[in-house]
Structure formats: structure tokens, C-alpha cells
Amino acid sequence: MIRQGLTFVITAYRSLLIHKLRSLLSVLGIVCGVMAVMVMISTGEGAKEEVLSRIERLGLKNIYVSAKFLSQEQQKQVQRKKSYGLSLFDVDYLASLSPMITQVGAVQKVALTPVGTGIDITPNILKCTPNYSELLGLPLRSGRFITVRDSLEKRQVCVIGAVLSGRLGREGRVGGLIRIDDLLYTIVGVLKKDSREPAKSAKVTNQNFNDTIFLPLNIPHNLTKFGSSIAQYSELSSIVLEVDGREHVESAARLIHRAMEYNHQGVLDYDVIVPLELLDQALAAQKTFNLVLSVIAAVSLLVGGIGIMNIMLATVTERRREIGIRRAVGATRRDIAYQFLAESFLLTMCGGILGVASGFASVFVIETLAGWPIEITVLSMTVPFVLACVTGVFFGYYPAVQAAKMDPIKALRTV
């Protein structure tokens, strides 16, 4: 059986070599279809991995409460209800909200400028709580991060990003000094370099911190809502909460929504962002995207398959005399059908191989010129190739049956 199958394939190969140009043109549709499918799947996988990595980077057990830009009408409402935006009181309140919330951190973006560095730099300057690096998983290259004592004692220390450290030269190492406005800060830590690009998100702080300076966020010894200067501890950029397990994220998010609404007297001057929900939404969107890709792939290969069928039907008509001779010397209808089916399969298989090779080249060109995130996977190679082979069998079946049904006597009379 295997030997007979190899015979069919070898005979089909020799037959296709007789008309090299026609065979090449007939598989051109398959080549383009496979290449298009491979590029689309690779691009989709690349985009998916990019989105998922950025979402997972936020921490799937984390929940973010971010300050919201307010319209003029909302600002009037804030003034009427005396809601002062995100504050350290919110941090203290949320930290005692539930045992599900294991720790709470905060960050405040400040408009300060380093001076006297000798180079043109405009880094992000963030005041943060000591646990901010742990919440976001920021690894250190050297030194340490900001501590509780730094915040309580208002020490003039800072932690800087790796790229900024390199640009500052010797002064960018641990122990170096950097002047910010009128104060001189001692560098106590340098972060490891982050090669990932920042996400273009307006809601959640998801950036690399290569050009960032971290300063201590001053924490008063005793926070009370009835103090005389609540606004002093307001205007945080965001609050980060860590939940004890992914299974509790949804319930913790609902609790945080209710607590913030109560604490801010119904004023929506904040956004609650749950990365785990964003992940679920991204996966749902990816399923829809995959469905669209499947439809496009089916159409592309359908066009190529129709081209193969037309060529095979023309080939059957041209080779009527050959079919008659083969039948006369003992070939059965099944042998004739298998012969033409083997030719169709071989055509699409070669088209699939050429398509995968072209797909590799196209992906490389797109990634180089456009800079899109592209991920070549085993799936992106095997799916279009297998579909091409199946297309060859499906569209080659009808011409093969037509050849097998041909009357050998009439076929031998063909001139």
C-alpha cells in the first residue's frame, strides 16, 4: 500500500514537471493564500502577546485606583461636596478595608526638574510609598529602594532608572547626588534596565522606568479624616492595591468601588482599573480577531483552491488519450482517481511550502520596516500549510472523479 502510494506521488511529480510554468502558476494562488494567512496569524499572535505582557506587567492580583481628569462641571461638584481627589486618607481607608487586600501603595507625579546635571534631561519624577517597587515588580541593579524611614523622616534620597543613571555618568551611581529644584538628593538605588516599551494607556501607569526618578512620598505619623489639612495629603496620581489571590480580585474590586464611592461622597474623580478584567477582555477580543482571521484565511485558500480545480479540469481534458491508454493496459478507475488526486495534493503541498517560506520573508520585512510586534509560532506555520493540503484534496477530488469516469474507448479516439 505504501509502495503504491509512493508510485502515485512519483508519477504525479514527473507529470507536473512536464509543464513547469503551468504548475507554478497554478499554485501561485495557494502560495499567496498561505503567505497571507501566516502573516495574519503571526501579526495577531504578536499583538496578543504584546497586550497580554503589558496587562500582566501591571500585576493580575493588583487593582489600580487612578486620578481622573475632571470637566468644569465635575470640578464644581467636587468643590460642593469637598472631595479632594485621591489622598493618603484613601490609602489608609482602603488598607483597612478587608483582609483580602494585603498591601496598598501610592504614587504622586510631581512637576519638578533636575538642574545642574550638565545634560538635557526631562525625567518623570514620582513620589511613591516604599512598597511601590514590590507592587510593580521593579528589580534593582544596585543599592536599595525607598524605605519607610525615608518617607517618615523626609530624607532627601532617590532611586533612578538605568538609562538615566547611564546618562548621568559617575554621578548616576549609588551615592551620587542630583539636584532637583533647590534640594540635593542622594541616589540610594538604581533600577535594572527595562527593555519593554511603555503602553499607550491613559488610565493606568504602565511604563518602563528607565528615565524615572523616585522620591519618598512623605507620610504623616497619624492620619485622621478630621484633621485641619486634608488637602495637604491629596492629589495622588494613583493607588495600587494587592489582593491575596486572583480568585478574590473580582470581589475586592466591587468592595473598592463601594468604598471609594462612599469615601468621595459619590464624586467620580477616580477610575478603578482591574488588570485581570482587562486580560479577560483582551482574550475575548482575541477570539473575535481569530474568527475574522479564519474567515479571511478560508477566502484566500478558497480562491487558490478554485484555481487548482480549474487547472486540474483542463489537465484532465488534455490528457484524455493518456487516461485511455492507462485504462487499456489495466489501470482501474481508482488508480486514475488516485493519480490525479496525488497531482492536486502535490501541487498544493508545494504551494504550502513556498507559502510558508514567503510568509517568513514577509514577516521579517514587516517587522523590520513597520516595527509591528510579530510572533511566529508553530501554529502560524502548520495551520496554513495543513489547510493548503486539505484544499488540494478537496478541490482535486472533482477533477479526479471526472478523470476516473472517463470512457476509455472514447478517450483513445481523442486525437
Image (cartoon, rainbow, N blue to C red):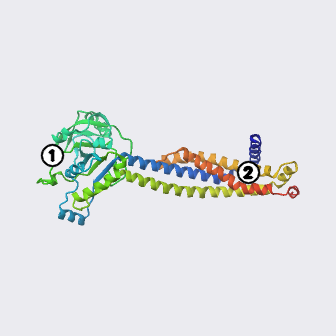
Q: Which of the marked residues, 2 or 1, is nearer the chain's N terminus?
A: 1
- Furthest residue toward bottom: 73
Q: Secondary structure at mark 1?
A: loop
The residue type indicated by label 1 comes to: Pro
Which quadrant would the N terminus be assigned to in this image?
top right
- Badge 1 density bin: few <14, some 14–19, many ≥20, Cα 10 Å: few
Q: Pick out the residue farthest to the front.
A: 99
The percent coordinates of residue 248 (x first, y second) are 34, 49
Give x and y (percent) for residue 246: 36, 47
Asked if marks 2 and 1 touch (Cβ < 8 Å), the reply is no
Residue type at mark 2: give it.
Answer: Leu
- Residue 231 location, x and y as percent? 16, 54
Q: Residues under labels 2 and 1: Cα distance?
A: 81 Å
Q: Secondary structure at mark 2?
A: helix
Question: In this image, 138 relative to 47: left or right?
Answer: left
Residue 83: quadrant of the picture:
bottom left
Label disc, if present, on residue 220 of the rendered structure: 1
The quarter of the picture where residue 313 lies is bottom right
Q: Residue at x 24, y 41 (%)?
A: 130
Query: Left of 228 or right of it: where is 186?
Result: right
Q: Does residue 361 appear anywhere in the picture? A: no
Can residue 62 be seen at all in this image of the molecule? Answer: yes
Q: Nearer the viewer, residue 121 or 212?
A: 212
Identify the residue at horizontal 60%, vertical 51% (top origin): 34
- What is the number of the mark on residue 381? none
Is 144 or 374 nearer to us in this picture?
Answer: 144
Residue 345 percent coordinates (x, y): 70, 49
At label 2, counting other C-alpha atoms closer than 10 Å, the crowd grade (few under 14, some 14-19, many 20 or more) is: many
Q: Name the residue tied to disc 2.
A: 341
The vertical placement of 81 against 95, above or below, is: below
Q: Residue at x 63, y 48 (%)?
A: 352
